[in-house]
Amino acid sequence: MLTDRQLEILLAVWANPNLTYGDHAKKLEISENTFDNHLKAVFRELGANNLAAAVVRAVQSGLIPPHMLSKSGTAEE
C-alpha cells in the first residue's frame, strides 16, 4: 500500500513528466533526495520499473481511480 505522500508524488510525476525531480521536490517542499526515495519506494511497492507501469498497477490495484487520468495522460486536479 502506498502512503498518501507516495501517491501524491506518483500523480505529480504522471501529471507533469517534463519537470525535473528537483522541480517536483520544490513544489512539494521536500528535498530532491526525499522525492527520489519516495518515487523509488512507489516503484518497489508496485513492482514497477517505470512510471507508466507504476500508474497502470496503481489503477489496477484501485489506488488511483481511472477517472483521475485524463485522455491526454495527465492527472486531473
Image (spheres, grey):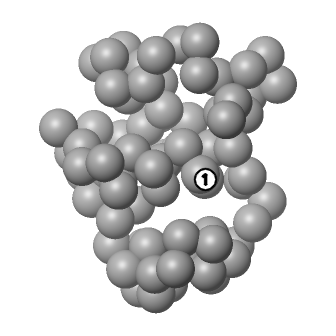
Residue at x 32% of width, y 17% of height: 62
Could you tell me residue 33's position as x and y percent? 41, 85
Could you tell me residue 67's position as x and y percent? 59, 12
29 with respect to 69 (left or right): left
**Vertical position of residue 9 compared to residue 60: above or below:** below
**Vertical position of residue 3 compared to residue 65: above or below:** below
Question: The residue tagged with tag 1: helix, strand or loop?
Answer: helix
Query: Type of residue at label 1?
Result: Val
Could you tell me residue 20's position as x and y percent? 69, 73
Q: Nearer the viewer, residue 32 or 56?
A: 32
2 with respect to 26 (left or right): left
Q: Nearer the viewer, residue 39 or 7?
A: 7
Q: Which residue is mark 1?
A: 13
Residue at x 59% of width, y 51% of height: 12
Q: Quadrant of the N terminus?
A: top left
Work out which residue is located at the far left of the displayed protein and give it.
1
Q: Residues within 10 Å of mark 1 (few under 14, many from 20)?
A: some
Q: Quadrant of the C terminus?
A: top right
4 with respect to 68 (left or right): left
Residue at x 78% of width, y 16% of height: 71
4 with respect to 36 (left or right): left
Residue 66: in sight, yes or no? Answer: yes
Could you tell me residue 40's position as x and y percent? 34, 62
Residue 43: in sight, yes or no? Answer: no
Residue at x 69% of width, y 30% of height: 76
**Vertical position of residue 5 compared to residue 72: above or below:** below
**Vertical position of residue 49 compared to residue 29: above or below:** above
Please tell me how many numbered marks the rendered image carries. 1
